[in-house]
Each structure stands twice: as C-alpha cells, then as structure tokens.
Amino acid sequence: MSRTEETFTGYIDTPIGLLEIKGTKKEIVSVSFTDKKSKTSCLSEEVEKCRKELKEYFEGKRHNFTCKIRLEGTDFQKKVWQELLNIGYGEVASYKEVACKIGKDNACRAVGNANNKNKISIIVPCHRVVGAGGELTGYAAGLWRKKWLLDHEKKHINAF
C-alpha cells in the first residue's frame, strides 16, 4: 500500500482465533491471525464485505470469496498465489503440483516460501497445499489451524 492510501481494519472471531482484515476502500491487502484487536477499528465497504464472507466461510455457507484482493509480492510469489486461487474448496495440491502448474518444476521449496509470505490467509488458500505424500507441512498460523481448515472444508464441501 502506498503511504498516502487510507487503510481500514476489521476483525472477526473464528473457531480458530481472531482474524484481522486490512484493506483500502477498494481491496483487501491482508487477512491474518492475531492475538488481540487494536484499539481502533475502521471499516471500509470492502473490509466489511470480507468480514461477512469470512463469517459465511466459517459457518460452512461459502466456498468462494468475491471480495477484491491485492497481492503484494515478487512476480514469483504472485504466480504462486494466483495458482493457489485455483485449488478448489475441499481440495489439496502438493508443493510440487503447484510448482509444476506455474512452470517451475523444481521450485517446491520456493513455493513453500511463497506460501509462508502469503498475507491473505484463507482467501488465498495456502492451507490447501500439502506435502508430496499428503502430509500436513508448513503453515504460518500453525499446523493445527491448517488441519482444522481442511477438515472444515471436507465437512462442508457438499453443503449446497
């Protein structure tokens, strides 16, 4: 975000912790787990829309997000994150599969590093990326949250 761009912050309590949503008037720039709310909370329409959609996701009523997001990172990171958006609700892909889909067959570790830098948790579903044998590996917010999110999606995949 540019220094002159007005930022807005909202929060949502979820079964796996407090989420902080940051954005501008038009886009979401981060969704991350946090321990506490800041003293100020100021919503834009897009932050409020994101809060509503995340609430529906955690209720099992939403599989896809429509809020606008802004991916900020290197070109490689953006390619990885764009590919993550193609992993369907309740599905998983390995780091190797993601690397191959972006044309970088030997970049599994770099894909993992890009996942770690993802600022828009859940909406950019890095929790859907697993190890080659399907094992849960690496999740900045904790493997227990990754497991919860994957189990949640499996439970609600046929909800509508």
Image: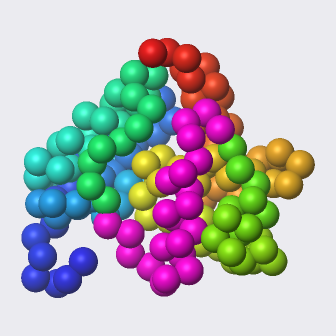
Residue 4 image offset from top left, x and y in percent = 10, 82
| Residue furthest top in the image | 159
| Residue pictured at 67% horizontal, 64% vertical | 101
Looking at the image, is 62 positioned above or below residue 74? above
Residue 25: quadrant of the picture: bottom left
Q: Is 27 left, or right, of 157 in this rendering?
A: left
The percent position of residue 122, horizontal first and vertical second, equals 48, 47
- In the depicted structure, whether residue 6 falls above or below residue 44: below
Determine the residue positioned at 61% across, 19% down: 155
Q: Quadrant of residue 8?
A: bottom left
Q: Which span is picked out in magenta?
A: 70-91
Whether residue 4 can be seen here = yes
Where does the image place residue 147, in percent across and percent down from the top left?
68, 37
Place of residue 22 in the rendered image (x, y in percent of width and height, measured from the top left)? 27, 59
Q: Residue at x 78, y 74 (%)?
A: 105
Q: Residue at x 31, y 36 (%)?
A: 53
Position of residue 61 in the picture relative to residue 113 (left or right): left
Whether residue 98 sits left or right of residue 65 in the image: it is: right
Check the image and tell me how it is coloured: rainbow
